[in-house]
Image (tube, rainbow, N blue to C red):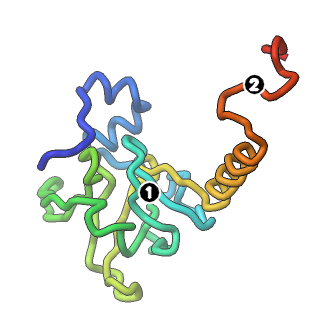
Amino acid sequence: MTFSVIKSDAEWRNLLTPMEYNVLREAGTERPGTGELLHENRAGTYHCRACDAELFRSSTKFDSHCGWPSFYDPNEKDAVVYVEDRSFGMVRTEVQCATCGSHLGHVFPDAPQTPTGKRYCMNSVSLRFVADSDVVDSEEAASDDAAAGVTPGAPAVGEAGQAGE
């Protein structure tokens, strides 16, 4: 499989924390119950921590009681790719980001309570959460700036020479 985001091992190591690198690039796993996104309940989107591709919507997240954030469907059907994983003496289906090939977790057909019957069991460290309210706030700020004639990154009137204050 060819991914659209390709980086060298050194580039990934510089971009990611050691834990992120272990999980995303070496198919490691965070300990169950420890992930920062396990109990995230706000509306929003979950992105790949490595390349920022959109992967899951919060509307598909559910509490599977497995110790990792669980979803029943990716945001888009082509957002993830599936790889047979025969590690640890079992056969599982690994889920990777379709944009950069990073390891996200595994998918299991053991969630009959969901519309798809699937449980995408993802590592929190593989994901970055963007709350819908954060997107709305940044869009409103950009809209307000545009209405006021402010160029992003340009100092506002009266700010010249006030750097560092």
Between the residue at mark 2 and the residue at mark 1, the CA separation in whole angstroms equals 46 Å
- Measured as percent of width and height from the top left, residue 117 is found at 32, 83
The first of marks 2 and 1 along the sequence is 1
> Which residue is the extreme one toward the right?
158
**Is 154 placed above or below 36 here?**
above
Query: Which amino acid, by three-letter code, is at mark 2?
Result: Pro
- Looking at the rendering, in which quadrant would you find the C terminus? top right
Q: Which residue is mark 1?
A: 32
Q: Residue at x 60, y 58 (%)?
A: 131
Residue 146 located left or right of residue 163: left
Q: Quadrant of residue 85?
A: bottom left
Q: Residue at x 30, y 60 (%)?
A: 79
Question: What number is the disc on residue 155?
Answer: 2
Question: What number is the disc on residue 58?
Answer: none
- Measured as percent of width and height from the top left, residue 157 is found at 84, 27
Residue 9 located left or right of residue 16: left
- Measured as percent of width and height from the top left, residue 16 is found at 41, 32
- Measured as percent of width and height from the top left, residue 59 is found at 51, 74
> 140 or 101, which lies in front?
140
For the residues carrying marks 2 and 1, which lies nearer the camera in this image?
A: 2
Q: Residue at x 32, y 43 (%)?
A: 24
Query: Which amino acid, by three-letter code, is at mark 1?
Result: Pro
